[in-house]
């Protein structure tokens, strides 16, 4: 997504792949087996869990800033796409494919998972795992857009629900 390395400051919001929006609560020096490493200490907004990410490894794990307005518009385009073809895979094979997309950390891949599961849900009932994944994808997208636009999650959720009510 971004070629240059992003440097986060305390108080910044950062997106941790498949886990969601986090806040940088501190930047500390930690000793790991005699090696001193500078780490970002992140607090996940949804769960309050703390994660440590070595500053030098942040890009490799996919840590990135929240998306831009241009990227948000692209997400809404993805969500509005109606021509989705579902092959006749078993639900668990579909589930693995969706999970692989979520793990990429790409907000666009997560949007595709959300869109595809919403469309599939209109055709037939989702398995328990697929319903869980739809909730996960929706939560990741809604939280990131809400943080990026400084809006409430409820407003973002309503905007997204409107897309699927229309289509």
Image (cartoon, rainbow, N blue to C red):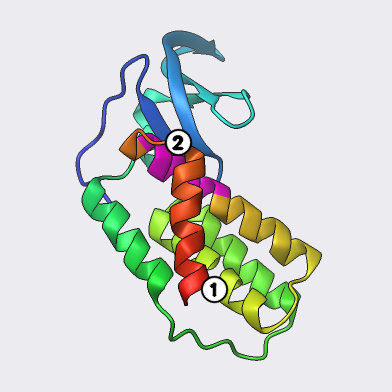
Q: Look at the image and tell me whether residue 110 can be seen.
A: no
Task: Give the x, y percent position of residue 8.
Answer: 31, 23
Judge whether 85 appears above or below 62 on screen. below
Nearest the viewer among 156 and 23 is 156
**Residue 91 found in image quarter:** bottom right
Q: Is residue 119 left or right of residue 38?
A: right
Is label 2 or label 1 in front?
A: 2
> What range is drawn magenta here?
139-147
Point 37% across, 24% down: residue: 55
Point 52% across, 70% down: residue: 165
**Residue 116 disc label:** 1
Nearest the viewer among 47 and 106 is 47
Q: Residues within 10 Å of mark 1 (few under 14, many from 20)?
A: many
Point 47% across, 35% down: residue: 21
Q: Look at the image and tell me whether residue 56 can be seen.
A: yes
Verify whether residue 49 appears in magenta.
no
Question: Mark 1 or mark 2, which is nearer the start of the sequence?
Answer: 1
Query: What secondary structure is found at the residue carrying circle 1?
Result: helix
Point 55% across, 28% down: residue: 44
Q: Is residue 73 left or right of residue 119?
A: left
All told, the count of numbered labels is: 2
- The residue where tag 2 is placed is 152
**Residue 139 disc label:** none
């Amino acid at each position: 997504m971004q070629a240059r390395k992003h440097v986060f400051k305390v108080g910044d919001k950062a997106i941790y792949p498949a886990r969601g929006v986090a806040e940088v609560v501190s930047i500390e020096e930690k000793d790991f087996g005699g090696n001193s490493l500078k780490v970002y200490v992140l607090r996940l907004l949804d769960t309050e869990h703390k994660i440590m990410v070595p500053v030098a490894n942040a890009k490799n794990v996919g840590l990135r800033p929240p998306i831009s307005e241009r990227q948000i518009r692209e997400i809404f385009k993805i969500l509005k796409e109606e021509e989705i073809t579902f092959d006749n895979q078993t639900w668990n094979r579909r589930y693995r494919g969706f999970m692989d997309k979520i793990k990429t950390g790409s907000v666009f891949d997560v949007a595709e998972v959300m869109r595809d599961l919403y469309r599939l849900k209109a055709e037939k009932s989702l398995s328990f795992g697929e319903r869980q994944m739809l909730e996960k994808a929706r939560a990741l997208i809604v939280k990131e857009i809400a943080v990026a636009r400084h809006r409430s999650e409820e407003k973002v959720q309503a905007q997204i629900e409107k897309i699927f009510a229309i289509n």
